[in-house]
Image (cartoon, rainbow, N blue to C red):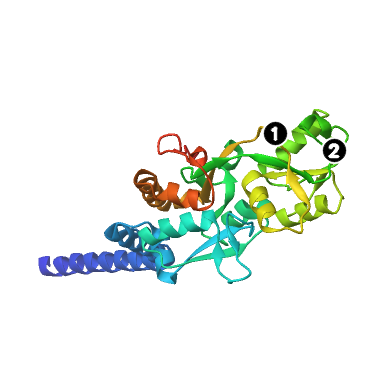
Amino acid sequence: MKLFQLKKKFALCLSLVMLLGSMTACQASSNGASTSTSASNISAQTSSAASGESALLQEIKKKGYITIGSSNDAPFFYKDVSTGKLAGVDVDILRAVCSKLGIADVQMKVIDFSNLLVELNNNNVDMVADAMYVKDARLKVAAFSDKWYQEGEAIVIPQSSAIKSKDDLKGKAVGAQPGTTFYETAQKWQKDGAIGSLVSYDSQATLMTAVNMGKVDAVVTDGIVAGYTLSKDSTLKLKLLSPYKAEASGQIGSAVRFKDEAFLTEFNTVLNDMKKDGSLLKILKDYGLTEDYFVGVDEGKTKNVK
């Protein structure tokens, strides 16, 4: 009798064990995708931690190049039509930083300036760089590097223009490129009654063509770009308004997605080393920029929102 009862108890215990095992197996099966994804994430994080490099840097190295979004404007980031190669002050700075990070090549994807941060956040480029001012409004959209250099706007007019100062722009048609700080400056002028109409043009080239053909009386644009363009193109019968004190001076940086701030830390470390050893200033001087354009380590720190 006791033996029979023991057998019954043993059978009951065995059934319970099998039932629990079946339930556990079903749960593991239903959560299989989640478990696999978690394992993948852990693996990626472990790989990143083991290499001591950010996930983005590893990804860039794997494909062999970094993709930079830019609007193809000289002398910042553009394709030289005579050589077919990328050129510009931003390109040279980026190449120097990327070389020290172990990135083999820099490539450009041409995007309208006003859409650069949109395309960045759509994951169509790794970074954007196009003489972009680091501003509060933009810091809400992306994470910015420490600043590279600083500059301001210029007013471009025909060589035969009677305009002698900003005061002479009252009632005049002025062109500017949407998405830029200079367009915002021109909008303020229009609101204050300092200019007549404000006309939009989508690139530096169309701006210069418009004022050269008399479609507008003047254009407001990047001072470095304007000076470079006029020095290179003798067909443009234009000049910079002088004397003129820039009102929208700002500091330049590059941007990445908020999730890629680990890469930004790596980038900034190299950038600030270049400031300390003089190599960044040398690049600026190669483009005719003086020490007035240089931004030091401390004054160039960017405080990102996220």
| Rendered location of residue 16, percent (x, y) | 27, 64
Look at the picture and state if 306 lies above or below 34.
Answer: above
Answer few, some or many: residues within 10 Å of disc 1's Cα (few below 14, many 20 plus, some between 14 and 19). few
Image location (x, y in percent) of residue 180: 67, 45
The residue depicted at 38 percent of the width and 46 percent of the height is 278
The answer to whether 82 is drawn above or below residue 38 in the figure is below
Q: Distance between the Cα atoms at labels 2 and 1?
A: 14 Å
Q: Dot 2 surroundings within 10 Å: few (below 14), some, or many (20 or more)?
A: few
Evaluate whether residue 122 shows in this view: no
In the image, taking residue 201 as reference, residue 39 lies left or right, namely left
Residue 83 sits in which quadrant? bottom right
Q: Is residue 18 left or right of residue 29?
A: left
Q: Amino acid at mark 2?
A: Ala
Q: Which mark is residue 162?
A: 2
Q: Secondary structure at mark 2?
A: loop
Nearer-the-camera pick, 76 or 14: 76
Does 151 appear above or below 14?
above
In the rendered image, residue 45, in percent from the top left (x then y), is placed at: 34, 58
Tally of numbered tags: 2
- The residue closer to the viewer here, 95 or 302, is 95
In the image, residue 82 lies at what x, y percent? 62, 71
Q: Is residue 47 left or right of residue 67?
A: left
Residue type at tag 1:
Pro
Q: Upstream in the sequence, badge 2 or badge 1?
A: 2
Residue visible at 71% across and 38% down in the picture: 184
Label number found at residue 148:
none
Please give the residue where the numbered disc 1 appears in the rendered image.
243
Quadrant of the image occupied by residue 123: bottom right
SS at mark 1 in the image:
loop
Q: Residue at x 66, y 54 (%)?
A: 231
